[in-house]
Image: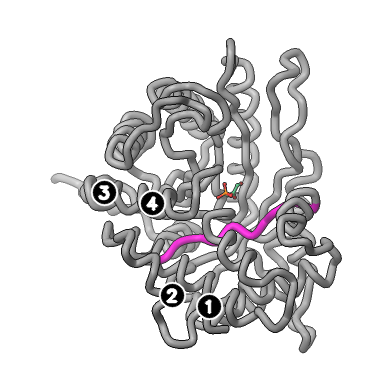
Amino acid sequence: MLTVTQPPVESSLAGIARALVADGRGILAADESLPTIEKRFRTIDVESTEEARRSYRELLFTAPDVEQYISGVILFDGTTHQVDASGTPLVDVLTARGIIPGVKVDRGAKPLAGSPRETVTEGLDGLRERLHDYHERGLRFTKWRAVIAIGDGLPTPYCIRANADALARYAALSQEEGLVPIVEPEVLIDGDHTIERCYDVTEATLHYVFDVLHQHRVDLDAMLLKPNMVLSGKSCPDHATVEVVADMTVRCLLHSVPAAIPGIVFLSGGQTSEQATERLSAMNARAPEVPWQLSFSYGRALQEAPLNAWRGDPANTEAAQRALCHRARLNGAARYGRYEPEMEGELEAAPGGADAA
Ligand code: 13P
């Protein structure tokens, strides 16, 4: 008699991974390290104090209706210890709104011994204990960012392998502690390389990463991939069109990412907010049949508008929240391939929009 194997029973980890890429929603990356948030605040002349960071992030997390478009937020460790005015941890504030809280757990990209122009991401020491503590405090997913630079003779296979090994160890440990890992191998936009070169480096990196994830027995159903889009280098004289970016990115992913992954959540990585939205929308419009959800996990491309609206002044809180919601809504539309550049003006046009505040 033919025995039909039942599909594996849905584990809660796989359920969380799918919830993070639910229809029309994506992830807000608000996990800037202390030096990075200081750099962002400097652009609006705000000093990066504990209280400034807390009130800025609280305004992001409590923006009215933002949960319609934001499924999860990635926090920095410091934020996981902060509380709102009523003493409620910000982690619980998110959970109560139906937004899944996650945390960046790597300790940053450090010079790679033997190849000093490259980096390897550190943070594995003591990671199991830290992950356990995060899970106890209500965090449900994690992120680890590896950085791959393109340049003369770069990247080396050694750098890609060292970073892939760390990503896989991190991902396996996260799943063991009941947390969904977001595996982020970022091929940087910096440089004058062509889009074809970015394609080749991204494809090679993803092949390494999935090979090592398999060796480390990482459950593909219970993780998300956070890659760069395939782009021309920032200072490349020849910039690819939105259609070429969308098609080459999708082709690269089809050639290197297993279909079992529930979702691919792009980083914005130096694109403008509009570019990040338009390119995601083009992918979803032109390739609706891909096996994974194509979504976003943007930092700068979601925060640039609210940061500039806020400028450290509590009187601007509502305007900043509207700016975030507007950006999140446009990216929500991009999830369906329905973003149009004309939608950019809708915030200003709306009565009581940011301009009116
Ligand atoms: P950007 O979207 O600003 O690249 O940030 C996403 C992120 O989380 C990088 O690790």
Residue type pointed to by label 1: Ala
- Tell me what residue is drawn at x 43 percent, y 20 percent: 197
Side of 119 where 21 appears, left or right: left
Q: CA distance from mark 4 to mark 2?
A: 32 Å
Determine which residue is flagged by label 3. 5
Q: Specify whether 64 is left or right of 32.
A: left
Q: Position of residue 292 (x, y in %)?
A: 33, 49
Spatial distance from mark 3 to mark 1, Cα to Cα? 55 Å
The Cα atoms of the two marked residues, 4 and 3, are separated by 21 Å
Q: Amino acid at mark 4?
A: Pro
Choose mark 4 or mark 2, whichever is in front: 2
Say which quadrant the N terminus sits in. top left
Residue 167: x percent and y percent? 61, 36
Task: Establish whether ligand 1 lies closer than 8 Å to the Cβ of label 2.
Answer: no
Sequence-earlier tag: 4 or 1: 4
Q: Amino acid at mark 3?
A: Thr
The residue singled out by tag 1 in the image is 354
Asked if the residues shown at circle 4 and circle 3 are in contact, with their CB atoms under 8 angstroms apart, the answer is no
Q: Start and end of the magenta stretch?
A: 25-34
Element carrying mark 3: loop
Contact (CB < 8 A) between labels 2 and 1? yes
Q: Which residue is mark 4?
A: 262
Q: Residue at x 58, y 59 (%)?
A: 304
Quadrant location of the C terminus in the rendered image: bottom right
Asked whether residue 5 is drawn in magenta, I would say: no
Label 3 Cα neighbours within 10 Å, binned few <14 / some 14-19 / many ≥20: few
Q: Which residue is pictured at 52% across the width and 78% down the height?
A: 355
Q: Name the residue carrying label 2.
A: 347
Amino acid type of the residue tagged 2 in the rendering = Leu
Q: How is the image coloured?
A: one colour
